[in-house]
Amino acid sequence: MNILQPVDWSFPVPVRLGPGRLHEIGPYCRAAGSTAPLIVTDRGSRELAFIGQAFDILTAEGLRPQIFADVSPNPTDQDAEKGKQVFDAGGHDMVIAIGGGSAMDAAKAISLIAGHDTPLWSFDFDVPPPAAHRFAPLICIPTTAGTGAETDSTAMITDTTRGIKGCVWHPDHRPVLTILDPELTLSLPRNLTAWTGCDALTHAIEAYCVDMFHPMCDGAALEGLRLINRSIRQVVNKPDDLAARMAMLSGSCLAGVAFLKGLGMVHAISHMVGALYDTQHGLTNAILLPTVLRFNRPAIEQHVPAMSHALGLQSRDFDSFYNAICAILDDLEIPRSLADIGVGRDRIAEIAQKAHGDPAAGTNPRAADVAQIEALVQEALDKAR
Ligand SMILES: [Fe+2]
């Protein structure tokens, strides 16, 4: 770790936390000069109460909202293009993302390309960003405690031409407001509560283990890990516990802030599995996490004591930490193999090849070549923990 390497801190964004704060979007949009916000959510969330609620709040404020919900579980560049067409044709002036990671990623991509003709993949994380645009203002309202995507501009989008997930962003693009309202997570089904919670757990661990001097992100990662560990079982077993829902939502947000540092091999592999099999992101991460922890062990042992402290463990050795993570996964009834979620053995080489090129592989604390990633996928198919 090079403590003298220059780093830019440019976050977080304005965040409003607390029960009932969804109601503030109406006055906020009106004060910001919006007359026609576009609500973006995913197909699975279209009929959920909070979408209608947000629509009614905006309408009551005298605004002309519209809902765009043609978004896949793993959003694609085609979804983003359709959303842009709706935004442009409807004369919209604000994008409001309401939902989980899919809604958030799609909304970010739409607000990147709305109102101009620069193609989406010009905003690929791996190429120099285009000149600054006047991006459509973006409000993020997560309804799951997991994605952590509500405070930055990066979005994971499936590139339908290349069959991989790519990351799009622009350094000048970020949410103008994030609302963390735990009431919106109360209706999340038990399985999605567990799976999205595992995504947040993975963000905190992977971000903290990235080999970079970033005390702000590291602090966020550890406090996020503490909050997630304290509340993840509770929100699954007692879904109406609003305080636990608030703790999970805050922990997820902190873990999201933390991964400005980068992520690791769990996400690199998971992105490609998701792109090929449309698996649920947090669930895929949860299955991969133990396998990757074992692989990374030589490179992360110095980080284990602080993470163990965040988990409230007496012992600070790797095995105790590893077992504590596996105990969480067991309690949440996470399957023990990628095969259990439909991943086949015929595409291991393809997954490994593509994962090797994912930005998250570049920040994994232990370097891995394609053959090593192939072995990890194989292991996660045989027995992940
Ligand atoms: Fe994630």
Image (cartoon, helix red, strand yellow):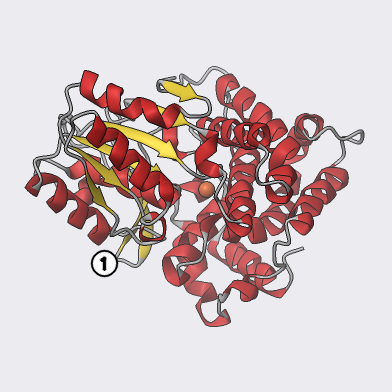
Q: Position of residue 267 (x, y in %)?
A: 54, 52
The relative height of residue 76 versus residue 124 in the rendered view (above or below) is below
Q: Residue at x 40, y 20 (%)?
A: 14
| Front-lying residue, 62 or 338 | 62
Q: Residue at x 34, y 67 (%)?
A: 163
Residue lying farthest to the front in this orientation: 60
Query: What amino acid is found at the position of numbered circle 1 in the picture?
Result: Thr
| Front-lying residue, 113 or 16 | 16
Figure label count: 1
Place residue 231 in its image quadrant. top right
Q: Position of residue 349 (x, y in %)?
A: 51, 73
Q: Is residue 124 visible?
A: no
Determine whether, in the image, residue 110 is placed left or right of residue 278.
Answer: left
Q: Is residue 38 visible?
A: yes
Determine whether, in the image, residue 170 is placed left or right of residue 287.
Answer: left
Q: Position of residue 143 (x, y in %)?
A: 48, 43
Determine whether, in the image, residue 81 is placed left or right of residue 175.
Answer: left
